[in-house]
Amino acid sequence: MADPDLELAALRAAILRRGRPDVDAAARVVEDYLAGVLDDAGAAGNAGARRWARDRLRLFMVVSWGNWFGVLERLPREYPMLRDEWRELVGDPARFGPEDLVAWWWCLQPAMFEPLVAAQLREMGPPLRDGVAGVLKDGGNFDARMVDWPAFGAV
C-alpha cells in the first residue's frame, strides 16, 4: 500500500517543477475523442455538432473534474495558486477550451492525472454521444443549445 505522505510529497514536487502544459498534445487527444463521439452519434462532419460537443465536453470537465481538487487541497501552500489557475481556465471559455483543461491537469502530475483524464473521457463518451444524437433527432439546432457560460457561473 502506498504511503499517502509520500504520494503528497511526489505531487508537490511534480507541481513545483512542472513546465508549460502541452496544449498541442491535449488538443490532438480531444480532437480524436470528439471525432469518435461524433462518428458514433452519426454526426461526423457536422460543424454544429462539433461545436456543441466541444462545449458540452468542456461543461462535463468543469463539473466532474472539480472533485479532483480534494487531492490538491491537501497541499495548503500550492492549493490557492492552483485554484486560481483553474478558475482562470474555467472562467474564460472563449479562450480556454477542453484541451486547455486536459493539458493543465496532465501538467500537474502526469503519472496521476493522465490516467484519470483518460478514464473520465471514457465515462463521458456515451452521454456525449447520446446528447449529440438527441439534438440531431430533435432537428439539429446545436447552436441554440450551447452552454450559457456566464449564467452557469463556472467560477
Image (cartoon, rainbow, N blue to C red):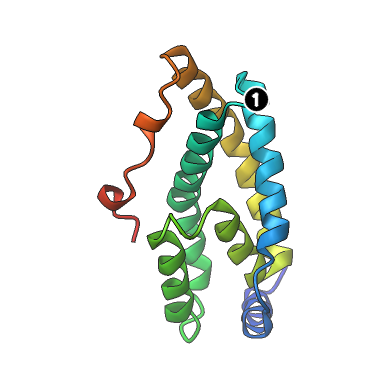
Q: Position of residue 75 (x, y in %)?
A: 51, 80
Please give the name of the residue rendered at 29% of the width and 54% of the height, measured from the top-left corner: 153
Rendered-image quadrant of the C terminus: bottom left
Q: Position of residue 15 (x, y in %)?
A: 62, 79
Q: Position of residue 130 (x, y in %)?
A: 53, 23
Residue kind at label 1, given as amino acid type: Ala
Q: Is 38 positioned to the left or the right of 111 in the image?
A: left
Q: Is 137 positioned to the left or the right of 115 in the image?
A: left
Q: Is residue 77 above or below residue 129?
A: below
Residue placed under numbered mark 1 in the picture: 44
Element type at mark 1: loop
For label 1, count other residues whose C-alpha is less than 10 Å away and answer few (under 14), some (14-19) or many (20+): some
Q: Quadrant of residue 123?
A: top right
Please give the name of the residue rendered at 50% of the width and 30% of the height, measured from the top-left corner: 48
Please give the name of the residue rendered at 69% of the width and 31% of the height, measured from the top-left corner: 36
In the displayed orientation, state which residue is furthest to the left. Answer: 151
Q: Is 98 positioned to the left or the right of 83 in the image?
A: right
Q: Considering depth in this image, is 129 or 120 the residue closer to the camera?
A: 129
Q: Considering depth in this image, is 121 or 12 the residue closer to the camera?
A: 121
Q: Is residue 25 above or below residue 110?
A: above
Rendered-image quadrant of the N terminus: bottom right
Q: Position of residue 143 (x, y in %)?
A: 40, 32
Q: Considering depth in this image, is 9 or 62 the residue closer to the camera?
A: 62
Tally the marks.
Answer: 1
Q: Quadrant of residue 43?
A: top right
